[in-house]
Image (spheres, grey):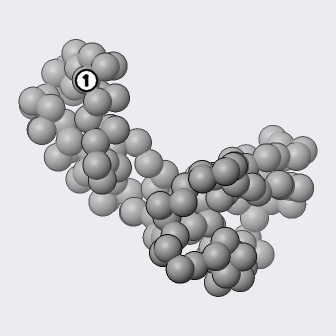
Amino acid sequence: MSLLAAAPAARGLFHRAISESGGAFNHGQLPSLNVAEATGQRSLRELGAADIEAARSISVDRLLEAASGPGSSIFAPLIDGNIVRASNVELYRADLFNDTPILIGFNSDDRDGDFPPDASLLDQFREHG
């Protein structure tokens, strides 16, 4: 949600928003379109799809299994230069976001693997805010 709140194409679409799991502020640098395309091509090769027709025949269960493996980035946000122009940290610091009231939060034990074990949540928000 917070990625859309910074997207020019989404201006005026949202009056208020709730973004759980950190609001895409703690994910580090998002991959570029070129990196994401290469990841997708590599993933399809690993799934045995030589072309788009073969890719269309891959079952949903097989795609979900591949996407849920360790370190998988098959289905992840990326910087395409159009919808997502930069990381949320960069966009919000530069005041390049839509003026939408947004509530960003976490649930108990939510995304705790993103932070170093000695870092507090407050420290992480101070670093990125």
Q: How many marks?
A: 1
Of residues 1 and 111, the one drawn nearer to the viewer in this rendering: 111
> Where is residue 34 shown, x and y percent of the image?
31, 59
Q: Is residue 65 left or right of residue 75?
A: left
Q: Is residue 30 above or below residue 73?
A: below
Q: Which is nearer the eye, 86 or 125?
A: 125
Q: Where does label 1 land, which residue?
A: 62
Residue 88: which quarter of the image? bottom right
> On screen, 67 above or below 8?
above
Q: On the image, which quarter does residue 106 sit in?
A: bottom right
Q: Is residue 25 visible?
A: yes
| Viewport quadrant of the C terminus | bottom right
For badge 1, the amino acid type reads: Arg
x and y percent of residue 27 in the render? Answer: 51, 64
79 sits to left or right of 3: left
Residue at 25% x, 23% y: name it. Answer: 62
In front: 2, or 36? 2
Question: Residue at coordinates 60% horizontally, 59% vertically from top-left?
Answer: 24
Q: Quadrant of residue 5?
A: bottom right
Name the residue at 55% across, 55% down.
Answer: 111
Numbered disc 1: secondary structure: helix
